[in-house]
Image (cartoon, rainbow, N blue to C red):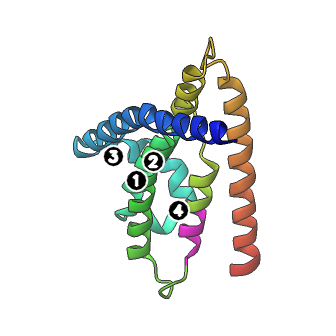
Amino acid sequence: MTESILYGTSTAVKLCFSTLGMMCFWTGLLHAAQTGGLTRLLAKVLSPVLGRLFPKNKHGGAFGAMCMNITANLLGLGNAATPLGLAAMQELKKESTAPDGTADNAMVLFVVLNTASLQLVPTFLATLRGKYGAAQPFDILPAVWVTSVCGLLAAVTAAKLLERRFCG
């Protein structure tokens, strides 16, 4: 058992360091994209869909932050999307009229979108698959697309139905 513990912890540390480089790269790239104005461009591209989902936040500061988070999720960046999601949630809280300690419908829907995480390019998963010997790390793309679209549709539908039922 001691040997398993030592091997498992050693493998976990090696895995953390091997994925840390990729996460730093994507986080830096997204930061450069944000300062370069890509946020505004993505907001324009995503605004027809997100505008329907978040009509009250369409013109606020949260919209760009949500777009960056969704973009990171589309690229399958997982952990790199987390700081962007936290920034979007802070902006949503600023725009919220809900009492402190309470989430409004936009905040709940954003958490649902973030958690369901539509992924077009599962970068992080492909990195892990490549690290552990998969010959074709991206051969799972069709399965990822189908499952993430189905999961996202189910989650958004449930959130909207519950919103109507409990919030009128």
Residue under label 1:
84
Which image quadrant for residue 140? top right
Q: Nearer the viewer, mark 4 or mark 1?
A: 1
Residues 119 and 49: in front is 119
Inter-mark Cα distance, 4 to 3:
17 Å
**Circle nearer the N terminus (3, 2):** 3
- In the image, is residue 133 above or below residue 44? above
Residue under label 2:
81
> Which secondary structure lies at badge 2?
helix
Q: Is residue 88 left or right of residue 167?
A: left
**Circle nearer the N terminus (4, 3):** 3
Residue shown at the point (38%, 67%) measured from the top left: 91
In this orientation, does residue 46 appear? no
**Circle nearer the N terminus (3, 1):** 3
- In the image, is residue 90 above or below residue 2? below
Residue shown at the point (50%, 56%) measured from the top left: 51
Inter-mark Cα distance, 4 to 1:
17 Å
Residues 90 and 57: in front is 90
Q: Is residue 98 left or right of residue 167?
A: left
Q: Which mark is residue 39?
A: 3
- In the image, is residue 98 above or below residue 42? below
Residue under label 4:
54
* Residue type at numbered disc 4: Phe
Which image quadrant for residue 106? bottom right
Q: Nearer the viewer, mark 3 or mark 2?
A: 2
Q: Nearer the viewer, mark 2 or mark 4?
A: 2
What are the residue bounds of the magenta stretch? Answer: 103-110
Crowding at dot 1, Cα within 10 Å, few <14 / some 14-19 / many 20+, comes out as many
Label pair 3/2, CB-CB below 8 angstroms: no
Residue shown at the point (33%, 40%) measured from the top left: 30
Label pair 4/1, CB-CB below 8 angstroms: no
In the picture as drawn, the residue positioned furthest to the bottom comes out as 99
